[in-house]
Image (tube, helix red, strand yellow):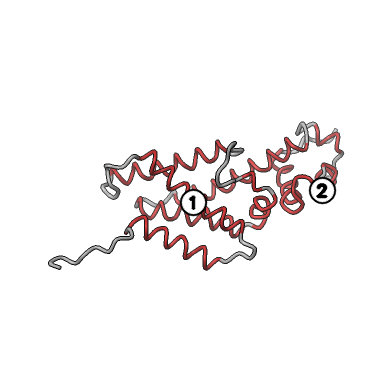
Amino acid sequence: MRPKLDEELILKAALPFFAKYGYKKTTLEDVAQALDMSNTNLYSYFRSKRDLYQCCVDYAIDQWQEYVRQQTSEIEEPKAKLVMAWRSAVGYIVGNEQMMALLKNDPTIFPMFPNVDPIEEYNDWAVQYVREILEEGIEKGVFRANINIDIAATMLFGWYKYLIVSAVEMEELDSALIAETISTLSTILFDGLLVVPEEGV
């Protein structure tokens, strides 16, 4: 009897097909053949192609968020940690062809203004992560204490989402423009738009 495969191996094999061909054009035959197994055997792991696809999306986003956690885990200064969260999240997408293709093929995965959020659990984690950075910054006296943290976290997540959606929608990826956008957002966030008058003027 053939030993049961680790589900992660199946997801790793299926993800390139969904990324390259999209959900509709990918078949279970494609995935089963890549794994040297039968369709029937594949159904013993996943109920349907939709189930396999959703698990692949969840797996891809898990990898994405784990990368952000790793990139920010050693940073203690809240401002630097917040900027790195943005940079690493966007950088991961820009540098990951499969993830970029997956989002291009299926914009419903990460819509800018969703009526129904298919990855609500992951987005809620991202908002909570930003909230924790803000709380840490307030405790350390880096960020203002008189802000509504829930609103601020949601707004900052909205900026981050704008960056991701913009990168995905570009016909040709402009890394310099993305970097400049992150820099501009950081300047507006931390320094504001108003010119501070010099003392005595």
Vertical arrangement, residue 83 with respect to residue 65, above or below: below
Query: Residue 180 location, x and y as percent?
Result: 47, 65
Of tags 1 and 2, which is closer to the observer?
1
Find the distance from the CA under tag 1 to the CA under tag 2. 36 Å
Residue 40, percent across and down? 86, 34
Helix, strand, or loop for circle 2?
A: helix
- 37 relative to 15 in the view: left or right: right
Badge 1 local density, few (<14 within 10 Å), some, or many (20+)? Answer: many
Task: Provide the secondary structure element on which disc 1 rests.
Answer: helix
Give the position of the N terminus as an image quadrant: top right
The answer to whether mark 1 and mark 2 are in CB contact below 8 A is no
Most extreme residue toward the left, as rendered? 200
Q: Which of 124 and 32 lies nearest the eye of the viewer?
A: 124
Report the quarter where the C terminus lies. bottom left
Q: Is residue 51 left or right of residue 187?
A: right
Seen at 57% across and 41% down, the residue is: 114
> Which amino acid does the dot numbered 1 rest on?
Tyr
Q: Residues within 10 Å of mark 2 (few under 14, many from 20)?
A: few
Given the image, on which type of amino acid does mark 2 rest? Ala
- Residue at 51% x, 52% y is 162
Percent across and percent down for residue 195 are 27, 64
Q: Which residue: 39% across, 38% down? A: 150
135 displayed left or right of 164: left
Kindly indicate the quadrant of the structure image that contains residue 192: bottom left
Provide the residue designation for mark 1. Answer: 160
**Image mark count:** 2
Which residue is at a point 60% across and 45% down the rendered structure image?
A: 61
Residue 171's mark?
none
Comparing 92 with 100, the one in front is 100
Q: State which quadrant residue 59 falls in.
A: top right
**Residue at which label 2 appears:** 34
